């Protein structure tokens, strides 16, 4: 009876949707449900975000403010509003602790905040990335004493597959993996997500869905780690890795191109390998291959800085008196997200060598203090005069809207981490170095 009522409400778009955690995942998702006519409440602990949303202002570059205004999303930090929700979607952070272990404290705090207001006939869907078993450990086990899961409370896991900045695949275009703790949970979950997503991919258990999400991201981490290692070896042989990737890519089967870079960033790729290897270790297996990809990607910044030091030594330029310009501090191109950005690791390592640092990023006007960094810098304008001031320029993130020809023409030395300029020059000039 409960299930039927909830399904009916969802199908008639009379269900109220609560999205907890209005970040890169939660905000676009909440806006999609608003767009389909659902009354949607956004819950967050960040008062600044709440204030902005209620004024119709977007704090994520790829989401236009006009869409926030039109879609009338109501944001609040009052968790008692969970009482009025039929569906509660959890999109809170799942970072790593300092010793590279899963940090589920945000998720646990969220569950604690919503628990007093969860009532029968609701669906709770977890979207945060985590190790297989998390939905059972952190959600099912917390509610099973008070509720009969699958009868009067429905619990799903549906991993977010958002790719911020991707113009081809928007949130709703990516097939939605969906799983439920019981058959009934899955049935309700499928109806809920079908209201917004074009295609669903149901799997048999919440742990299988959690595993699927980690597999997707670890697949990227491992392949990026592989190509980064290949870059280091090609460099030792004085070969151009980009020429090699281009040639290998002509094989019509069995090869997918991945590109080297300064290391990985964002909320997924640098983190997820460690979630899986942590869980595997708990089960008695040391997943060396997965862990190594994470380590290789993390160490790319050290390799890049060492290479820069070597070039300066050969050129007999005093590093300690030089000033570098970093191009792109977002963790990937065409987005404003700087979380876990390898640019910051490179900047910190250069500063430790007494090198002065400036940056240019059209998506990131200013750097604010974070847990690990406090650069106190603002993005400088990219002009001929400014470029000529610097001892060297490092292309860390290759946003499309940067004038690379201006950089190429006016910089003294260019270290290119993305193959943006070096890939074009088969034989590198003495001014452009592929790092
Ligand atoms: N960003 C991506 O591209 C992406 C893609 C796929 C999956 N994910 C996963 O989705 C989850 C969310 O990631 P994100 O990138 O949206 O994170 P985010 O940091 O952008 O947003 C998280 C939001 O949760 C809020 N929050 C933190 N603790 C809270 C609490 N106790 N109660 C309510 N709100 C709280 C924060 O204030 C923030 O607004 C993570 O598990 C991440 O791994 C992210």
Image (cartoon, rainbow, N blue to C red):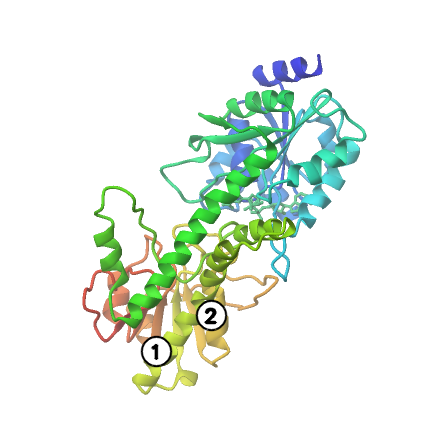
Q: Would you say 298 lies left or right of 419 here?
A: right
Q: Nearer the viewer, residue 64 or 392?
A: 392
Q: In 3D space, how far apart are the residues under numbered discs 1 and 2 (Cα atoms)?
A: 15 Å
Q: Nearer the viewer, residue 295 or 74?
A: 295
Eye-nearest disc, 1 or 2: 2
The residue that mark 1 highlights is 391
Image height of 354 relative to 283, above or below: below
Q: Would you say 152 lies left or right of 205 here?
A: right
Expressed as whole percent of the image width and height from the top left, the position of residue 397 reads 38, 59
Q: Would you say 106 lies left or right of 404 here?
A: right
- Specify the quadrant that holds the N terminus: top right
Q: Residue at x 26, y 42 (%)?
A: 253
The residue that mark 2 highlights is 347
Q: Is residue 426 visible?
A: yes
Expressed as whole percent of the image width and height from the top left, the position of residue 296 reads 45, 62
- Tell me if mark 2 has few (under 14), some (14-19) or many (20+) residues whose alpha carbon lies within 10 angstroms of its own: many
Expressed as whole percent of the image width and height from the top left, the position of residue 137 reads 70, 40
Q: Nearer the viewer, residue 45 or 196?
A: 196
Mark 2 or mark 1, which is nearer the start of the sequence?
Answer: 2
């Amino acid at each position: 009876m409960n299930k039927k009522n909830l399904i009916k409400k969802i199908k008639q778009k009379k269900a109220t949707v609560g999205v907890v955690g209005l970040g890169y995942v939660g905000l676009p998702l909440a806006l999609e449900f608003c767009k389909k006519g659902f009354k949607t409440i956004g819950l967050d602990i960040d008062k600044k975000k709440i204030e902005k949303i209620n004024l119709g202002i977007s704090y994520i570059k790829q989401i236009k403010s006009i869409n926030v205004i039109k879609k009338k999303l109501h944001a609040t930090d009052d968790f008692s509003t969970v009482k009025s929700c039929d569906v509660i979607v959890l999109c809170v952070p799942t970072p790593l602790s300092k010793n590279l272990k899963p940090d589920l404290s945000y998720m646990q705090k969220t569950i604690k905040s919503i628990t007093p207001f969860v009532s029968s006939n609701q669906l709770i869907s977890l979207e945060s990335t985590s190790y297989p078993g998390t939905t059972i450990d952190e959600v099912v086990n917390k509610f099973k004493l008070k509720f009969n899961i699958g009868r009067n409370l429905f619990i799903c896991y549906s991993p977010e597959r958002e790719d911020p900045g991707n113009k081809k695949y928007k949130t709703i275009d990516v097939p939605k993996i969906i799983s439920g703790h019981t058959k009934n949970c899955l049935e309700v979950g499928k109806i809920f997500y079908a209201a917004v997503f074009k295609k669903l991919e149901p799997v048999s258990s919440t742990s299988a869905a959690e595993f699927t999400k980690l597999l997707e991201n670890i697949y990227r981490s491992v392949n990026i780690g592989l190509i980064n290692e290949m870059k280091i070896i090609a460099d030792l042989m004085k070969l151009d890795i980009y020429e090699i990737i281009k040639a290998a890519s002509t094989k019509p089967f069995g090869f997918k191109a991945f590109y080297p870079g300064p290391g990985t960033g964002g909320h997924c790729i640098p983190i997820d390998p460690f979630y899986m290897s942590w869980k595997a270790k708990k089960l008695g297996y040391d997943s060396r291959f997965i862990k190594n990809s994470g380590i290789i990607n993390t160490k790319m910044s050290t390799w890049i800085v060492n290479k820069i030091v070597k070039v300066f030594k050969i050129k007999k330029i005093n590093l300690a008196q030089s000033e570098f310009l970093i191009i792109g501090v977002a963790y990937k191109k065409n987005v404003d997200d700087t979380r876990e950005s390898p640019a910051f690791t490179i900047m910190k390592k250069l500063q430790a060598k007494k090198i002065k640092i400036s940056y240019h990023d059209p998506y990131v006007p200013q750097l604010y203090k974070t847990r690990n960094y406090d650069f106190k810098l603002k993005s400088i304008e990219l002009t001929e005069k400014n470029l000529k001031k610097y001892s060297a320029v490092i292309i860390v993130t290759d946003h499309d809207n940067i004038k690379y020809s201006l950089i190429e023409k006016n910089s003294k030395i260019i270290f290119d981490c993305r193959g943006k300029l070096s890939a074009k020059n088969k034989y590198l000039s003495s001014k452009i170095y592929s790092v």
